[in-house]
Amino acid sequence: MRVRKQAKDPGDTEAAYALALRMLGVRASSRRRLGERLARRGFEREVVEAVVERLVSNGIIDDAALAESVARVSFENSPTGRRLVEAKLLRRGIDRGVAESAARDAAGDRDALADARRLAARKLRTMPASLEPDAVRRRLLGALSRRGFEPEIAREAAEAEIGAAKLWS
């Protein structure tokens, strides 16, 4: 287990700023997440707030740009629903309003049903042929829900792909 160094002087703003820059050099971070990390290192709340505000005012931390980037990449990598992208952004410390806006913008003109059908078709190919129809539906709906698709979209995609596969004709 790695032991993290604690702040030698919890009131040292420059040490906190230098540490924050090192942290941001490794991974982009939201203002909330960076503040939490500095606080865990033992810096005083006022110091953490001052450092985070300085980074924001210098344009080094931009939650909206981070959210937009993460959302865009999330949609590009695999069939994903908007709810999953929003949840991912919230876990990264992005404000709910910014997360919703970024996910909505990144989803743009994507066809959620087409994405869900693509994922359902892929999942359907890997399921045992001996499964009962209800088990197949449950598994597809679960997979689509975990990937953040709305229940109506998940249901429609699952039914469409089951119908297209003609499993129980």
Image (tube, rainbow, N blue to C red):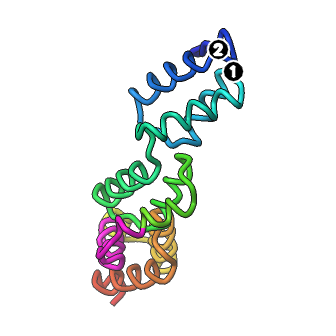
Q: Where's residue 75, x and y in %?
A: 33, 61
In this picture, is 140 found above or below 36?
below
Is residue 169 part of the magenta span, yes or no?
no
Q: Secondary structure at mark 1?
A: loop
Q: Residue at label 1?
A: 42
Q: Looking at the image, which is closer to me, 43 or 137?
A: 43
Q: Quadrant of residue 163?
A: bottom left
> In the image as oriented, which residue stretches furthest toward the bottom?
169
Three-letter amino acid code at the position of disc 1: Gly
Q: Looking at the image, which is closer to me, 120 or 53?
A: 53
In this picture, is 73 found above or below 160?
above
Q: Residue at x 36, y 71 (%)?
A: 120
In this picture, is 109 found above or below 61?
below
Give neighbour class at mark 1: few <14, some 14-19, many 20+ (Cα, 10 Å).
some
Q: Quadrant of residue 103?
A: bottom left
Three-letter amino acid code at the position of disc 2: Ala
Q: Where's residue 117, x and y in %?
A: 32, 76
Q: Residue at x 47, y 49 (%)?
A: 63
Q: Main secondary structure of the magenta part?
A: helix
Q: Quadrant of residue 158?
A: bottom left
Quadrant including the N terminus: top right
Left or right: residue 41 versus residue 88 is right
Q: Looking at the image, which is closer to me, 12 or 77?
A: 12
Determine the CA span between mark 2 and mark 1: 5 Å
Q: Where's residue 134, x and y in %?
A: 51, 79
Left or right: residue 72 versus residue 98 is left
Quadrant including the C terminus: bottom left
Q: Residue at x 41, y 71 (%)?
A: 130
Residue contact at pointers 2 and 1, CB within 8 angstroms: yes
Q: Residue at label 2?
A: 7
Specify start and end residues of the magenta stretch as a single range.
104-122
Label number found at residue 6: none
